[in-house]
Image: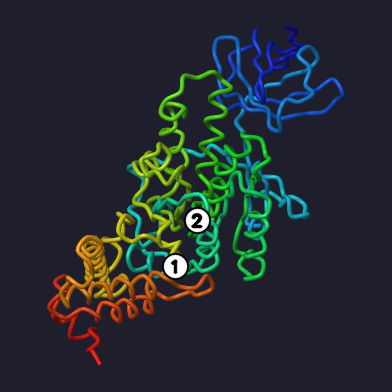
Amino acid sequence: MNMNKLRQYTGLEEIVGQLFVIRNIHNAGYNEIVEITEENGNIRIGLTLEVGEGYAVVQVLGGTSGMSLKNCRVRFKGKPLEFGVSLDMLGRIFDGLGNPIDGLPAPVAEETMNVNGMAINPSARDYPENIIETGISAIDVMNTLVRGQKLPFFSGSGLPHDLVAAQIVRQARAEGEGFCVVFAGMGVKYDTARFFIKSFEETGVLDNVIMFLSLADSPSLSRLMTPRFALTAAEFLAFKKDMHVLVVLTDMSNYCEALRELSTMRGEIPARKGYPGYLYSDLASIYERAGRIKNKKGSITQIPILTMPNDDITHPIPDLTGYITEGQIVIDRELHAKGIYPPISVLPSLSRLMKDNIGLNKTRDDHPALASQLFASYAKTKDIQAIASIVGEEELSSLDHLYLNFGQVFETKFVNQGYNERRTLEESLEKGWDIISILPEEELVRISEEQIKKHYREKR
């Protein structure tokens, strides 16, 4: 090993996949940028993934194909990977490593920021407040999204989570000025990437969106860095430019697969399902970058979307995600089979911050009671359907039949709405009252008499 000058070395010890090991060096830093110069003058960039006394394990962006053990010159830059950010990023499309892929030159950076972010002091965090309207009734009424919240979508293979994500990006609205969207796609197929770009271009929202796309054929490190570049852009807009930023991350399962692939390359002892033992802390390093900071006007709201392998909600990815985030929206295969879109299953879905951000002076005074009654009545409908499957519908009472009718109308008229249909919160609440009025007044035990008199639709 020859050291030509400070922090620059010649020769590698071992190359494995996208990684190489270099020894007899100074003590390098974790997540430090490494510049690799090949014999032909080609320069590659890498990141230190593991460091120790006199050695480092480096992952190369773009892979190690064609690299030589003896003739590569390795230079440690002494700083983490940074990203130049500015307001000119809005309306632009980048790859997973922050390089423009829309045919335009790179935007002029106002400043550079560490892509790994800075941990927010818990005492500096402000409680999330004020809702973001997605235009989807099952979310806005039943599982309200709040500024600064982390609300993941649990989906499955073949379900229309991409459509739902695109619809939310197109339709999301928040009170006040300065609302924008950062969209990050990890391991997405080329046709899926084209769908997102075309959808945003045709509806005119692309000017208010920053897209980061790591395609399925990209190296695993690109998938791992994509959400970090996206969140760096979001942090600049939210905390430096006082904007309210909605970050959509899809698909976090692809991110976790890349993490497992990298862990296997490094020879680490696997934990559940072969994922590394630090999966929880790694996911937290992404999810916890959402929120609000005291004395800052901006906010970062996250919607991570993940596909559950075999629709298993106890799988490590949704399981650990559920521990870190504040609720979940579940995309249901049975509703999808019925032709209902978006197929959001209301009963297992939850928004933990909803209760503090709806009601009088926030949304509408009848919102909490109506949402609670719709949930309770739909749950009772499911119980009656289970009984009917055993004893037959002819054995049910007239009230039970009313509940079955309510359940059907709830799914087809309230949960179901078109891909291009945007409902305001007011319209969704009124539709909720139309449907809950199928049931007799005495069944509405979670709504006050005053609100029933004001909103209940008499049977015709």
Q: Is residue 22 left or right of residue 429?
A: right
Say what amino acid the circle numbered 1 marks: Ile
What is the x, y in percent for residue 410?
A: 33, 72
Q: Camera-side residue: 390 or 443? A: 390
Pointer 1 or 2: first along the chain: 2
Q: Which mark is residue 159?
A: 2
Q: Is residue 374 above or below residue 325?
A: below
What is the x, y in percent for residue 416?
A: 42, 71
Q: Taking the image as drawn, is residue 292 in sight?
A: no
Residue plotted at (22% across, 60% down):
390
Secondary structure found at label 1: loop
What is the x, y in percent for residue 136?
A: 43, 68
Q: Camera-side residue: 82 or 132? A: 132
Q: In the figure, residue 5 lies in which quadrant?
A: top right
> Can you identify the residue that label 1 sits on?
340
Q: Taking the image as drawn, is residue 373 in sight?
A: yes
What is the x, y in percent for residue 49?
A: 57, 24
Q: Is residue 266 left or right of residue 395?
A: right
Secondary structure found at label 2: loop
Outermost residue toward the bottom? 460
Q: Which mark is residue 126?
A: none
Marks 1 & 2, CB-CB < 8 Å contact: no
The quadrant of the rendering that contains the C terminus is: bottom left
